[in-house]
Image (cartoon, rainbow, N blue to C red):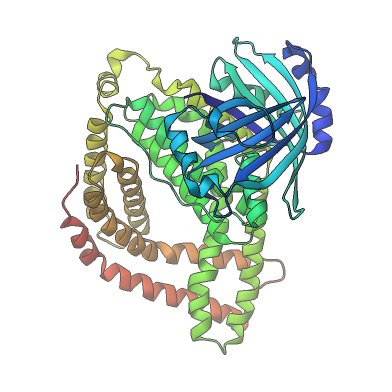
Amino acid sequence: MPLEIELKLRLSPGDAGRLRQDPLLASLTVSRPVTRRLFTAYYDTPGLYLQKHQMVLRLRHIGKKWIQSIKGGGDAALGLHRRYEWESTVPTGQPDFSQITDPSLIRLFERAESRGQLHVLFTTDFKRSKRMLRLGDGSEIEFSLDQGIIRTPADFTCEICEVELELKSGNVQGLYQFALDILPAIPFRLENTSKAERGYRLAVDSKPAPVKAAPVRLEPEMNLGEAFKAIAWTCLDHLQGNEAGILQSEDPEYLHQMRVALRRMRTARRVFARAFDATAFASATPDLKWLSRSLGAARDWDVFMSETLSEVRDYFHGHGGISALQEDCEQMRRNHSEVAREAVGSTRYTEAMLRLGVGLYAETWLSLPDPQQNESRKAQLEWSVKKFADNALSHGHEKLKKNYKKADGQDTEEVHALRIAVKEQRYTAEFFSDLYRRKKVKRYIKPLAALQETLGAMVDTAVIERLLNEVGMMEGKGGKGSECEAKGIVLGWIAQRGMAKRNGLDEVWRGFEKKEVFW
């Protein structure tokens, strides 16, 4: 099936004008720029039959021709859209099913449900300035700058101002490298939603919801490089699926899901570093750590406000110090949320995502140092993904046991280390679950989640003490009187809850230990 691969960049109309004059763009251009007006109608049924089947049907008017396109399947992350596409010329601006030759598509469109009720759901009307670029590595890219509008029959509209970099020949990392090269001069953001997706949202007035991690699709015959890319791509899809939400919404779940995505990405790198050259991941580490820190503080305040302080306030609702403390804490939460929002909206964030794209497709992790010093790594590279998963899960399981024995006392750092090991084993099990019986995997993961919750409550005292100290450092806050008492109440509350969880840790652990491993 024909696969379309393109990188989408969103930019402001003012920067679009500057981009046309960019010297780098001019130096790589190998064809005369051509500007055309493109009008496109997107079809579906009132029940959105095609969207539910992850298909798009559109008719585009180009000059005197109508081009019918059907797109479907594929994925999108880091601004890279990979879609299967079938195109044909049709005589009018109406769908022509006789032009469809693919058997699976014929069956889809033969359904009476879709054939009799298809209508225009929305349209796009934009000017496209198109040229061919040839990069230094020989890759050829079709560069398109689109400016216009998406419109529904009810006259709801949405602006279009984006660049599409379609790979015609060469390597995908070339798309990312070109974007990296123009970023310092022309600020933009990676665009993970297509015109069709934006049109559907406009037509049905839907808002994007927080995105949770999707299952990783693995095949036993995959090599380790392919498996790692599938896992990393899913983590990045999870991360960027919540990007718009954190920038446009106050819902803390978007931030939480971005944090989870970063932890999953970190876990994937640690797991595969046992087979790959770990130094290949080093270039992305500083930016990922920076992003984790920027989001982490905001997440700590969200959890504290919505869980611990909310419980304390409900119990001590008449305490003046609690109300004053809540006001100060809410200000701290807003401050850190703004820091997180600025980080995600920054050029540094976009640059970090582009570098991840370059690294993923350059596959630098496959280069080994001296093979004589890395025999175990070299051997693992020859393993099937199933054998590697068995080994990684066994290693993580044994690490859990060792950390549990160390965390048998009162040391917060050891408890925290156990909690991290639990999270990593849970994510590792989820990454490779496609290779095993799902029911067995779920039975193993469920007590891991209970362990994670118990250990989280045990380390909350140290986290919350740090947060309350931040409140004490606010300008003009001496931490005296009823508010100081309120802090003591909160610390006592969380310490009591942590102690209760600590006393129940052994029982939760035994519940986990009883579960049979699934690998």
In x, y percent, where is residue 333?
62, 64
Image height of 231 relative to 277, above or below: below
Q: Which of the 4 quarters of the picture holds residue 372? A: top left
Is residue 295 toward the left or the right of residue 449 in the image?
A: right
- The picture places residue 199, in percent across and down from the top left corner, at 66, 46
In the picture, measured across the screen, residue 218 lies left or right of residue 121, that is left
346 or 23: nearer the eye? 23
> In the displayed structure, would residue 414 be above or below residue 471?
above
Camera-nearest residue between 388 and 220? 220
Residue nearer the viewer, 392 or 411: 392
**Residue 116: x, y in percent?**
55, 48
Instruction: Please determine whether, in this image, residue 351 is positioned above or below residue 431.
Output: above
Residue 354: percent from left, percent from top = 59, 31
Is residue 185 left or right of 498 when viewed as pictured? Answer: right
User: Quarter of the image holding residue 62?
Assistant: top right
Lateral position of residue 72 relative to residue 422, left or right: right
Q: Is residue 263 visible?
A: yes
User: What number of labels is visible?
Assistant: 0
Please report the residue visible at 55 percent of the width from the left and 68 percent of the height from the top.
468
Would residue 247 be seen by someone viewing this image from the given angle? no
Residue at (61, 86) in percent of width and height? 320
- Find residue 251 and report its image quarter: bottom right
Q: Residue furthest bottom?
A: 318
Nearer-the-camera pick, 217 or 429: 217
Quadrant (top left/top right/bottom left/bottom right) for the C terminus? top left
